[in-house]
Amino acid sequence: MATRPPRVVAELGRPETPEETSARKAENSRNHRQRQTLRNLLLALGASLAVMLLIVLIVPRSDTPIEPDVDVASIAQQAQVASNDPLAVPDLPGGWRANAAELRVSQTDEVTAWYVGYLTAEDEYIGFFQGLDANPTWVAGLLERTLAAGTTTIDGVTWTVYDNRDSTDDVGNARYGLTTEAGDSTFVLLGTATPEEFETLASALTPTIDEQN
């Protein structure tokens, strides 16, 4: 069988040596492997994007934020072991809902509080706290250390008013607040709702407050 003549390297003007032939083939092999690796990566990326697109298409979506409704009465019954005073479960009008209910312990002064996060019928927020054996520092911390604006009487109960709606300071959710005390409990309401909505919640708390006075 005839022997194939050595490949002529145009740049050199002569046949390539066995060492150059070996180096050329190794380089060609390396370039081939790199092209195959890139091709495989692109195929894998395309498959992943296709799966993600499929998930986006088949998972139902809603423009309304998910706000879970919680059973405040049931959770309060379980949490009652933390207090000798009854934990408040206000009876509120239709359209109001709670999206959180739990016992919270302040890391600053270790005050335990029964907390319920309410959304009004107008989707405004009021956080309700019932501090157990609380202190003024705990109350001041919740209300961003703002000053009282006066008092108001709701169903015979005197509440201290904190009105930060016109404040230029960052007061978080404490745009408006009400506080009162009964027995060993300190009741704090704070949030972004209107004073009228605060009055609705405060009025619903009157039976629990009267029971502790």
Image: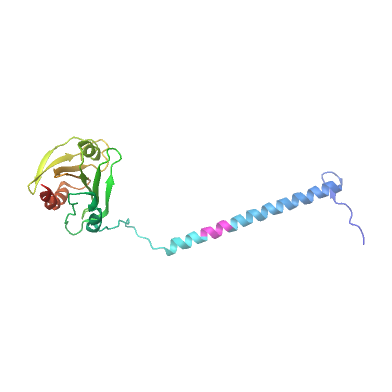
Residue 3 is situated, as x and y percent measured from the top left of the image, at 91, 57
Q: Position of residue 67 (x, y in %)?
A: 30, 56
Numbered label tally: 0
Residue 102, horizontal then vertical, whole percent: 27, 51
Q: Indicate yes or no whether the magenta region holds residue 167.
A: no
> In the picture, residue 70 is in which quadrant?
bottom left
Query: Residue sitting at 16 percent across and 42 percent down?
Result: 179
The color scheme shown is rainbow
Q: Position of residue 161 (x, y in %)?
A: 15, 40
Q: Residue at x 24, y 46 (%)?
A: 113
Image quarter of residue 134: top left
Q: Identify which residue is drawn at 88% across, 52% down.
A: 6
Taking 47 as reference, is 148 left or right? left
Name the quarter where the N terminus is drawn: bottom right
- Please report the bounds of the magenta region as a residue range: 44-49
**Residue 78 visible in image:** yes
Please check the rendered image and state whether residue 48 is part of the magenta-colored stretch, yes or no: yes
Q: Is residue 123 at all visible to an observer of this figure?
A: no
From the viewer's side, name the closer residue of 97 and 41. 97
| Residue 20 drawn above or below residue 150 | below
Left or right, residue 68 beside residue 54: left
Please identify the quarter of the rendering in which residue 186 is found: top left
Q: Residue drawn at (27%, 49%), measured in percent from left and top?
A: 103
Which residue is at the front of the view, 78 or 25? 78
Query: Left or right of 12: which side holds 167?
Result: left
Main secondary structure found in the magenta portion: helix
